[in-house]
Image (spheres, grey):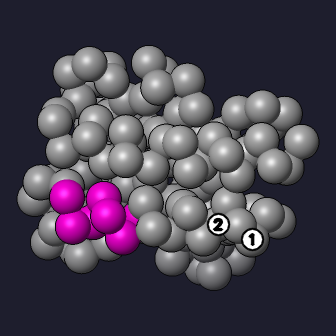
Amino acid sequence: MRRRLIGNVCAGLGNPLPVIFDNEWTDNKKFNEVVKLFFEDILNSLNDETVNDIGGFDFKIELKDNSFRILFGIEPSYMYDSYICYCFDSDKEKSCIHKGQALGYYGADIKIKSNKSYKRCGKEFRECIDRHYENLMRCLNEIN
């Protein structure tokens, strides 16, 4: 994953592009706790060979005024590695799954081969989103 190669950038190794999943939590501890429960549930629910083989994923959380966006998945480290990005958006219809492959060195030049919308992204992903949506929205509303 690009995140793990960042320490080598000074030596000229790794992808110089910024990471997609920064693995940083928000300042809102209550929101973070609900996201952790979502992550635990999604790991147990998701039927994705790549994520299951690794046993985890990286993530990025974006909080704005009255919305959130949770991205999680696997960034490619090297050429031809897989790229998987699950997006859980506060506007559920914008939630999606992107899958692709890195065609450049050190995980660069990602080409998306599959882009599934919320309605097409699979029963287990949608059901997990639905289980955690209300709690995340409640935490979001408490922020404002």
The percent coordinates of residue 47 (x first, y second) are 12, 54
Q: Amino acid at mark 1?
A: Lys
Distance, label 1 to label 2, CA atoms, is 5 Å
In the rendered image of this protein, does residue 31 appear above or below residue 69? below
Q: Residue at x 68, y 60 (%)?
A: 31
- Would residue 39 appear left or right of 124 to someone viewing this image? right
Rendered location of residue 119, percent (x, y): 26, 19
Q: Amino acid at mark 2?
A: Asn
Q: Secondary structure at mark 1?
A: helix
Secondary structure under the numbered disc 2 in the rendered image:
helix
Instruction: Read off the magenta span.
Output: 39-45
Of the 4 image quadrants, the one containing the N terminus is: bottom left
The residue that label 2 is drawn on is 32
User: Would you say the residues marked 1 and 2 are in contact, meaning their CB atoms lie under 8 Å apart?
Assistant: yes
- Label 1 belongs to which residue? 29
In this image, 135 relative to 117: left or right? right
